[in-house]
Image (cartoon, helix red, strand yellow):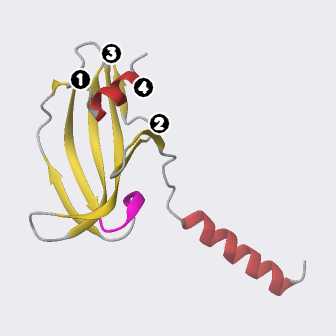
């Protein structure tokens, strides 16, 4: 490899190493208006509780209370398999699909676990994770 080619290859390799690592999302439910996915690299697991990121992609952009449009949102979710409850601590909304584009809103809340409703997307997620 001649020196200019080597420098170009080295620069490309360095640029590649600086790119953010993206999650490998797994789909757990698809409906006409949304796709719901989860990141299998759990944030934490303690006894019967699983803490993970979920992602919702909306087919049509949604509008926040602040009048900002978003096409996806990531939610830091806790699932308690033993009690069949779930809750969220943080919601991050993005202008683009797959949690890409401009971040248009962040909401942090204290974790409050509530019973998972039969037939809900939370039940589908719980049944997928709590085998």
- Kindly identify which numbered label has been placed on residue 86: none
The Cα atoms of the two marked residues, 2 and 1, are separated by 23 Å
Q: Quadrant of the N terminus?
A: bottom right
Left or right: where 119 falls relative to 7: left
- Mark toward the start of the polypeptide (3 vs 2): 2
- Mark toward the start of the polypeptide (4 vs 3): 3
* Range covered by the magenta-colored residues: 94-99
The Cα atoms of the two marked residues, 1 and 4, are separated by 14 Å
| Dot in front, 3 or 2 | 2
The Cα atoms of the two marked residues, 4 and 2, are separated by 11 Å
Residue in view at x 39 percent, y 62 percent: 97
The Cα atoms of the two marked residues, 4 and 3, are separated by 17 Å
| Dot in front, 4 or 3 | 4
- Mark toward the start of the polypeptide (1 vs 4): 1
Q: Are marks 4 and 2 in contact (CB under 8 Å)?
A: no
Q: Is residue 98 magenta?
A: yes
| Dot in front, 1 or 4 | 1
Residue in view at x 84 percent, y 84 percent: 3
Task: From the image, tell me which residue sits under label 4.
Answer: 128
Q: Is residue 102 magenta?
A: no
Task: From the image, tell me which residue sits under label 2.
Answer: 40
**Label 2: few (<14), some or many (≥20) within 10 Å?**
some
- Mark toward the start of the polypeptide (4 vs 2): 2
Asked if 11 appears above or below 121 in the picture, the reply is below
- Mark toward the start of the polypeptide (3 vs 1): 3
- Kindly identify which numbered label has been placed on residue 47: 3
Question: How far from the left and from the top, in percent, is residue 113?
Answer: 15, 27
| Element type where label 4 sits in the image | helix
Q: Nearer the viewer, residue 47 or 23?
A: 23
| Dot in front, 4 or 2 | 4
Left or right: where 110 falls relative to 51: left
Task: From the image, tell me which residue sits under label 1.
Answer: 118
């Amino acid at each position: 490899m001649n020196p200019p080619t080597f420098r170009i290859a080295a620069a490309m390799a360095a640029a590649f190493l600086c790119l953010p690592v993206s999650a490998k999302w797994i789909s757990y439910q698809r409906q006409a208006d949304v796709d719901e996915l989860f990141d299998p690299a759990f944030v934490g697991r303690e006894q019967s509780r699983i803490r993970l990121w979920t992602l919702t992609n909306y087919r049509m952009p949604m509008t926040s209370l602040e009048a900002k449009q978003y096409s996806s949102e990531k939610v830091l979710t806790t699932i308690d398999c033993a009690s069949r409850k779930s809750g969220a601590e943080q919601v991050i909304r993005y202008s683009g699909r797959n949690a890409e584009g401009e971040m248009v809103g962040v909401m942090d809340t204290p974790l409050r676990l509530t019973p998972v409703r039969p037939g809900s997307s939370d039940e589908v997620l719980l049944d997928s994770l709590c085998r």
